[in-house]
Amino acid sequence: IPVDPFDLVIFGGTGDLARRKILPGLYRRFLSGQMPEDARIIGAARSDHDDTEFRAMVGNAINEFVDRDKQEKATIAAFLERLSYIKVDARGEEGWKELAGKMRKGVVHAFYFSVGPSLFGDIAERLHAYGMADAESRIVVEKPFGHDLKTAQALNATLAKHFDEHQIYRIDHYLGKETVQNLMAVRFGNMLFEPLWNAQNVDHIQITVAETVGVGGRGGYYDKSGAMRDMVQNHMMQLLCLIAMEPPYAFEPDAVRDEKLKVIRALDPVDPDDIVRGQYCEDEDGPSYFDDVENPDSRTESFIALKTHISNWRWKGTPFYLRTGKRMRARTSEIAIVFKDPPHSIFGEQERQKANVLVIRLQPNEGINLRVTIKEPGPGGMRLVEVPLDMSFKEALGPEAEDIPDAYERLIMDVIRGNQTLFMRGDEVEAAWAWTDPLIDGWTDRGDRPKSYDPGSSGPEDALMLMHKDGRRWREVK
Ligand code: BG6
């Protein structure tokens, strides 16, 4: 279904995110027919370019970042026709009047701030001053949304001067991932799971987001952030919220976000003994973390594992283990709900049934896997084995599931539709920082050093101990 006609201005239109994700994503939506004929995309940035140069740059980005079989010459040309460029000085007055003059009446106006947060205030102010911030216009802001609670509050206050909350779309691209949305469908679209979805029946929950890439190229940013700020405060927190939240009364922005906020507020502080941080060493495939960030004294983590609890009726007593890191064994993101063991084995002690595990695979090979116990086939008596009920979305749904839109594509279309359900509200972001800050302050004050780990491993040894000491184990990263 095509969205309404729009003018989308991308500040930072020549930057990395625009080239890799935003513009190729928009092209794919255009190809799918979802972008209306009279949509316009305006790249805005500091450098000197004209429309032709900008279009050439976007054409190259499409060649580089869109699958070959989706590169249709005529469609690319038609898409590029919709693009124009304008040189704008975020901190000065150059270009703003011209930009305001380009905005058409009667179409959706969206402004994507694909720039560092230090420019958010300047841009918001000028959109207002040049009459582009009307009650219907929308702004999209990227992470990192602040560096801590204080800076996030300041950013929220700055944006609030010129835009209402319903106009502010804070992107967490994990919420745009197909399987993350599926998490809600599985929970609230089936009767099977929800009655068991609580501390009485769930032993623990593991969330793993493992990456094989290092931080090379982004060292400057990353060394000031680390895995906690880069992944846990936002992406992993959002996953945790969607698993732990109460059923919202509707799949509507504030209904969902109210429930997520309650989860974040109910998170316990984390005991320092339940946090393991790591930094990858060098190997034949790449430099060490220190070399990647060019800081031999760095105490920033490229890996973190931690255990936390949610103090509410549903979850009291069920630990949530989170782990994420760079240069790990495999690129794999999954959520595992590990149910309790059956209370008693009628088949004798040696045939003790293992716990059911529901695994939601976010990437790659998106799907759902449920481990169940059955009888081993054959005449050998009542012997039990575990088998997976495995559903790969690709296998189950065929070609449609092959064509899962990238998270950014989905989210940008939601901005145009005016649907904030998959975007973070200001109070959510602040609550997440309020939980994160004391943990970071704690290890900074104690002067803790991250443990080193081998690239291609599943993180430092101590991370395994984090679960072993509770008599549990991580699922393998593979
Ligand atoms: C980004 C982080 O938000 O998410 C990166 O800044 C990380 O460090 C990336 O690599 C992971 O996203 P995805 O979609 O590749 O899992």
Image (tube, helix red, strand yellow):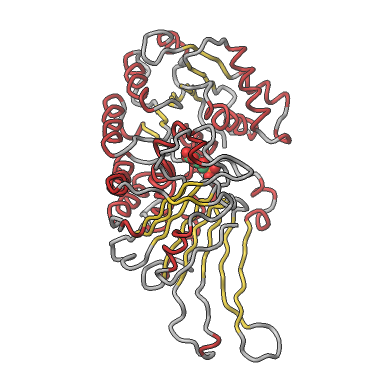
Percent position of residue 266, x then y? 28, 56
Q: Nearer the viewer, residue 444 or 388?
A: 444
Q: Which residue corresponds to the image point at 53% horizontal and 63% vertical from the top-left? A: 475
Residue 43 image position (x, y, % from top left): 52, 19
Expressed as whole percent of the image width and height from the top left, the position of residue 419 reads 43, 38
The quadrant in which the C terminus is found is bottom right
Between 244 and 233, the residue placed more toward the observer is 233
Q: Quadrant of the N terminus?
A: top right
Residue at 59 percent of width and 24 percent of height? 37
Position of residue 79 in the picture relative to residue 356 (left or right): right
Q: As displayed, is residue 237 above or below residue 313?
A: above
The residue closer to the viewer here, 333 or 449, is 449
Residue 274's image quarter?
A: bottom left
- Residue 66, relative to residue 357: is it above or below? above
Q: How many marks?
A: 0
Q: Position of residue 442 (x, y in %)?
A: 28, 49
Q: Going 57% across and 60% down the picture, which residue do you hit?
A: 368
Seen in the picture, residue 29 relative to 236 is either above or below; the reply is: above
Which residue lies at the image location 61% right of the left edge and 50% below the top edge? Answer: 364
Q: Is residue 334 above or below residue 254?
A: below
The image quadrant of residue 56 is top right
